[in-house]
Structures are given as C-alpha cells and as structure tokens.
Image (spheres, rainbow, N blue to C red):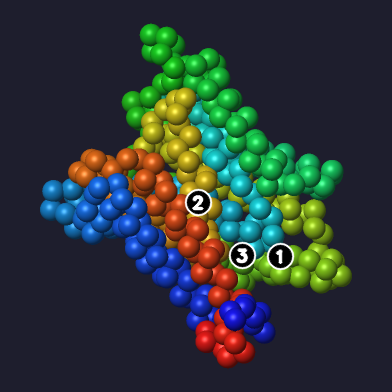
Amino acid sequence: MIRLEKRPNPSRLWTGLTPILAVLLTMVVGGVMFALLGKPPLEAIRTIFWDPLFHPQFAGYSRPQLLVKAGPLILIAIGLSVGFRAGIWNIGAEGQYIMGAVCGAAVGLAFYPAETVLLFPLMVIAGALGGWAWAMIPAFLKTRFGTNEILVSLMLVYVAENILASASAGWLRNPEGMGFPGSRNFKQWASVYNDELVSNTGMHWGVVAAFIAVIAAYVLMARHIQGFNIRLTGEAPRAAKFSGVSPARIIFLCLGISGALAGMAGLFEVTGPAGQISIDFGSGYGFTAIIVAFLGRLNPFGILLAGLLMALTYIGGELAQLMLGLPGASIQLFQGMLLFFLLATDVFTNYRIRLTGREVA
C-alpha cells in the first residue's frame, strides 16, 4: 500500500531538485503532446530550448530578445514572491501591469511633445503608482471587510482590460492616427522611448530595474527585519501576531510592492518593446510571472534564472510556431505544464512515500 507521510522538516534535496525535475517532465510530456500533433518531438524541444541561443540563422535576433522578455517577468515575479512568502496571494498582477502602463503613458502623453530628461522618470513613478493603487484595492478590501484577495485581484484584471480598451480607443487615442485605436508611438518620441542601453543586447531600463529588484528583494527578505516579519507571517501567522506584527500592515506592504513592480514593468514595456497603448497590450506577463515565481522557489536569484528560462520558452515557442507550424495554444500549454509539474513534484519536499511500511523516498 502506498501512502504519503509528512516529513519532520522540508527536504533540502527535493527543494533543489523539484524545479529541475519539473523542467524535465515538461520536456517529456510536452514532447508527447507535440508528437500527438504530428510534429517531431525532439525537433520541437530543440527548437524551443536550443535554437534561440545557438541557431546560426536566428540566434542573432533571439539572444537580445531573451532579456526583453525576461525583464518584465522577473520584475513582476519578484513582487509576487514577496506576497507569496507572507501567504498573500496576488493573482491580479496582470491588471496592475496594465494600469501601470496606462497611468505612466497618460502622464507622458499629457506633456507631449516635450523634450526633457525628467519626463521618463516621471512616467516611471506614475507607472509604479498606478500599479500600486490598483493593488491597494484588494489590500483595503481584505483588511477592512475580510474579502479574498485571490478573487478580488483576479476580477480586477478584467476591469483593467476594459480601462485599457477605453484608453486605447478613446482618451489616449492618437489624434493623428486616422481614427485607429492606439496611442501615439513612444518609439518616435526620444524623451520617453525606453531604448536599448547597449546595442543588440536587449538591455533596457526595465531589465536594469529587474536586476535591481532581485538584489533589493534578497536584502529585504534575508537581511531586513521587515523581511523576517513577512516570512514569519507566512510560516506562523499566530506567532507573528503574538510578536506584534500587524497583519494589515504586512498585507498593504506586500500588495503594494507587487503592484508597484508590476506597474513599473507595464510602463517599461509600453515605452519600449510594445511602443504604444493598444487594445491587445495585455500580454499575459502578469499570469506567467506566477509560474516564474514558483519555478524560482520564491527566491530572488532563483526567480532570475526562472525568468530567463520562461523567456526562452516564449522566444523558442514563437520560433517553433514559425518553423514547425505548432499552434500557439500548444506553446501556452507547454508553459503551463511547468507550473503543474512543479506543484506535483513539490509534494515530495514535505512528504515522503511509504510502501507497505518501508520508506522508499
């Protein structure tokens, strides 16, 4: 008879192994899925994970895109991980990402066509405040009325998407765009364009902010008393209350950090790779960042590596669609498998298998 037995302490071995095992299982099951779609599985896996970095024809374009895609994923995931460590489940980072882009773009467009170095930093602040304000809604409702932050933050994503559509087709629409939805193109406005800092690397200010966020999150969680309070709230809520930690303060702090970082990610994206506010600006980064956060074990440096890996699947997935004709939905399912298998294998971190009274794992 097979049963799960709780470990006295979480296994450090399995904690390190589960992300690797999840990636391997995703490759195996993803390969089976590709085979069922009539595509060569090994070639599909190679196209996703190898060709973007080493293919002689495509690597020159794909390598810089790795940082472009990874930047927002890492920035959002860092913010989410802080809340997750406290047991605060912000699932609506996509909405905060959108609102950061809308608020930051609105501030910039209000000064069009000003040419000043102060405008871009002002837009970054506005983007962070936009995401922060959107995250304060579930924070307030949870602390004041005891609502579930998962549902509230998730439902606010759809509100944000409608605000985005309204802005794109209405109050932020380009007056010189012949009636088509979409704001002015920030790539044509030097003061606010988030261009590459080093040519052909993909390194822009959003990527720099992501690296800074990784270091800041490590210092906060490992070296600061607030990080201890956050971890204590997530691991032992009753002990946190007895030690004088305010649950409401932790909720506002964690949701505020995640909202501000998601809003900044949206601003960096709209002034850089996306270039404008459009109806389809919401790219799903806020949801994918949840996978990145857990794949990185809620550790800042783990999230950095997980963000690069997930960015690779984005780029490789697009390449597989182009070269092999894989449907886009299969690539999204492939990415979702990462989280599924991570959660499945993560069981063995806290539980061991017992077979007829004999320990086997």
Residue drawn at the location 61% of the way across and 64% of the way down:
220
Residue 157 visible within the image: yes
**Residue sitting at the far bottom:** 358
Q: Residues within 10 Å of mark 1 (few under 14, many from 20)?
A: some
Local secondary structure at mark 3: helix
Give the vertical position of 334 relative to 165 (above or below).
below
Q: Amino acid at mark 3?
A: Leu
> Residue at label 2?
289
Q: Which mark is residue 220?
A: 3
Q: Amino acid at mark 2?
A: Ala
- Indicate the quadrant where residue 129 lies: top right
Residue closest to the eye, 56 or 183: 56
Q: Are marks 3 and 2 in contact (CB under 8 Å)?
A: no
Local secondary structure at mark 1: helix
Mark positioned earlier in the residue sequence (3 or 2): 3
Residue closest to the eye, 101 or 31: 31
**Number of marks in the image?**
3
Q: Amino acid at mark 1?
A: Gly
Labels 3, 2: front one: 2
> Residue at label 1?
234
Labels 1, 3: front one: 1
Residue drawn at the location 36% of the way across and 47% of the way down:
331
**Residue sitting at the far left:** 56
Q: Residues within 10 Å of mark 3 (few under 14, many from 20)?
A: some
Task: Tell me the distance, in whole angstroms, between the alpha carbons under discs 3 and 2.
Answer: 20 Å
Q: Is residue 336 left or right of residue 223?
A: left
Q: Position of residue 48 (x, y in %)?
A: 28, 53
